[in-house]
């Protein structure tokens, strides 16, 4: 059974969000389906998108598990964004939490050291 994922993030101001997500994800969107959406392909068939929905902005919660967690967090920092919060769970899994200008939360998770 194939599984595709499109995880959406409602934002209030598209140009501001577009710039922020380009810094977080390290690239421009893979495609712009229309004037109100931008889509990044994080891996094959796994996408994160922003959409202009001012009335719903600020409530998204997404965690993306990545290999090379420390390198990813360092690369994001080099682009000018620092995590708002860092966590290490009892099992050693690490999490770096970023909040966009609307308060949406996008985190990177990584395996124990």
Image (tube, rainbow, N blue to C red):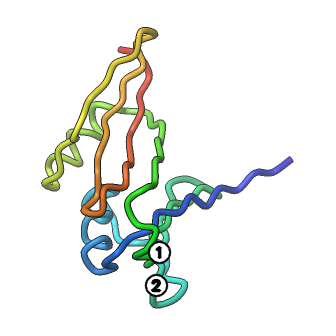
Residue at 46% x, 54% y is: 60
Residue behind mark 1:
51
Residue 89 lies, in percent from the top left, at 40, 16
Under circle 1, the secondary element is strand
Residue at 36% x, 24% y is: 94
Is 109 left or right of 96, judged from the image as shown? right
Image quadrant occupied by the C terminus: top left
Residue at 52% x, 89% y is: 34
Residue 6 lies, in percent from the top left, at 61, 61
Q: How many marks?
A: 2
Position above or below: 2 against 58: above
Position above or below: 54 against 65: below
Under circle 2, the secondary element is loop
Position above or below: 10 against 35: above
Q: Which mark is residue 21?
A: none
Residue 37 lies, in percent from the top left, at 48, 79
Residue 14 lies, in percent from the top left, at 34, 79
Is 86 left or right of 39, judged from the image as shown? left
Q: Farthest residue in the top direction?
A: 90
Contact, mark 2 vs mark 1 (Cβ under 8 Å): yes
Residue behind mark 2:
36
Mark 2–mark 1 Cα distance, whole angstroms, equals 6 Å
- Sooner in the amino-acid sequence: mark 2 or mark 1: 2
């Amino acid at each position: 059974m194939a599984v595709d994922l499109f995880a959406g993030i409602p934002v209030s101001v598209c140009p501001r969000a577009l710039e922020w997500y380009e810094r977080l994800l390290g690239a421009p969107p893979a495609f712009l389906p229309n004037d109100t959406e931008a889509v990044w392909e994080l891996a094959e068939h796994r996408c994160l998108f922003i959409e202009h929905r001012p009335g719903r902005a600020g409530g998204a919660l997404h965690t993306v598990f990545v290999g090379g967690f420390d390198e990813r967090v360092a690369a994001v920092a080099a682009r000018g964004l620092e995590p708002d919060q860092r966590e290490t769970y009892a099992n050693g899994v690490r999490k770096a939490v970023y909040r966009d200008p609307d308060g949406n939360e996008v985190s990177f998770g990584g395996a124990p050291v």
